[in-house]
Amino acid sequence: MRERHSTLREQRRAETQRMIQVHAVRLFVERGYDGATVNDIAEAAGVSPMTVYRHFPTKEDLVLVDQNALLVAEQIAATPAGQPLVRRIGNALVDSARTLAAGDDRFLLARLRLMISTPALRARHLDNHYVLQQAIVDGLGDEAADPDVAFQAAAAASACLAAMHTALVRWAKDDGRTDLPDLIAKALAAAFGDGTPRRG
Amino acid sequence: MRERHSTLREQRRAETQRMIQVHAVRLFVERGYDGATVNDIAEAAGVSPMTVYRHFPTKEDLVLVDQNALLVAEQIAATPAGQPLVRRIGNALVDSARTLAAGDDRFLLARLRLMISTPALRARHLDNHYVLQQAIVDGLGDEAADPDVAFQAAAAASACLAAMHTALVRWAKDDGRTDLPDLIAKALAAAFGDGTPRRG
DNA sequence: TACCGCACTGTTAGTGACTAACAATAAGGG
DNA sequence: CCCTTATTGTTAGTCACTAACAGTGCGGTA
């Protein structure tokens, strides 16, 4: 069989991956992103440097890896096509932030702070938004069959994501005390007009 | 004297810098970004690799270096404070694009295509927008004294820049045939509402 | 239970981006 | 003409990242 594969193997793999990332973020926080080499992280995690690279293709991925990205694209594609794009995308972002903020907290915050303060990480993080934007437009499918519509959707999506990023920065600056979904809603409102996306 | 410095020295420096960048972009287009090493570029430009690094701190800068960035921030700060932020920023972006498109063309297009297709360059390019956003907010000065206003301005600015980036991508895809300022205006309209940016 | 395939890991050697430190050259100002 | 200094070249080194090969243990199979 090819399906229904390993359980113990997958567990081990996921565990070492988690361990590597935890030690990486810890060292980055302690010494700064440039102050900790991949070899340091490997040693701290008790694995070989090569193993680190097999789990995280680049050093940046040690901070950036995160699965909730594509979730947003699906969420948008699932929303009814009636409302304007910025509202649909905005609502999806706020909702996904709600589920996101429900999870961990300190670890996410530490990673986010690293992403904001380290230029290389910040750049990659913003590029992920670009990729996500493409996914959003692709997820619209037939709705964006017309190139002009696709272009408008891309513009709206990237604008929404950028506004959300501003909220993330603010959230990190406030040490996670403020409500993230609310903050995102405020950022969207500031960019697109009062009360446009969402309410309540 | 420290001021009113060199003329010949500055000319030589600017010339070698331009030469390095021209050869770099040419080689990147020919062989791809990863296909041309900094040593290759140095050899092509007839300088030592170290000289390349002194003019362009990173390999990415060989494509990204561009002075029209800060121009936008000044342009926005110069606009009257009456209208809403997205409109002011949008107008400034359209205007700066107008002056930008008046200059060269093929070289700019080649660089832009590299920035879009190469993940590392695309990431850095987007990060430049982040830096520019900060500059825009700082340029508002007293207007953004209130943290909440500054936050809203940041959200609006980043959203505008993201929309502009979408226009740049489209422009590059159209091989520069369409009118860039017009395309940016369309992207802003798609994101922020029909007609000229914003209302209410 | 014994066997075999494959996922995971470690080791080694290498490339390429980037830095630090020192020496040589040439432009600018007095 | 002399002194300062900006610019460049050279060397040696660090670090992120890759390719290739070998060892080990899990997973299914006979």
Image (spheres, coloured by chain):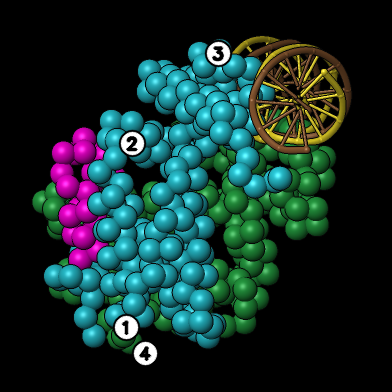
Chain colours: A green, B cyan, C brown, D yellow
| Label 2 close to label 4 by CB (< 8 Å) | no
- Indicate the amino acid at tag 2: Leu
Give the structural element (helix, strand or loop) at label 2.
Answer: helix
| Label 1 close to label 4 by CB (< 8 Å) | no
Left or right of B61 in this view: D13: right
Q: Main secondary structure of the magenta part?
A: helix
Left or right of A20 in this view: B31: left
According to the picture, the residue beneath numbered tag 3 turns out to be B46
Evaluate whether residue B127 shows in this view: yes
**Crowding near the residue tagged with mark 3, few <14, some 14–19, many ≥20 C-alpha atoms within 10 Å:** some
| Label 3 close to label 1 by CB (< 8 Å) | no
According to the picture, the residue beneath numbered tag 2 turns out to be B108
Per the rendering, the mark at residue A200 is 4
Give the structural element (helix, strand or loop) at label 1.
Answer: loop
Q: Earlier in the sequence, mark 2 or mark 3?
A: 3
Instruction: Name the residue: 51% across, 76% down.
Output: B141
Tell me the CA gap for discs 1 and 4. 29 Å
Q: Is residue B188 above or below residue A19?
A: below
Q: Is residue B87 above or below residue B81?
A: above
**Crowding near the residue tagged with mark 1, few <14, some 14–19, many ≥20 C-alpha atoms within 10 Å:** few
The residue range painted magenta reads B167-189
Evaluate whether residue A20 shows in this view: no
Per the rendering, the mark at residue B82 is 1
Chain identity of mark 3: B
- Indicate the amino acid at tag 3: Gly
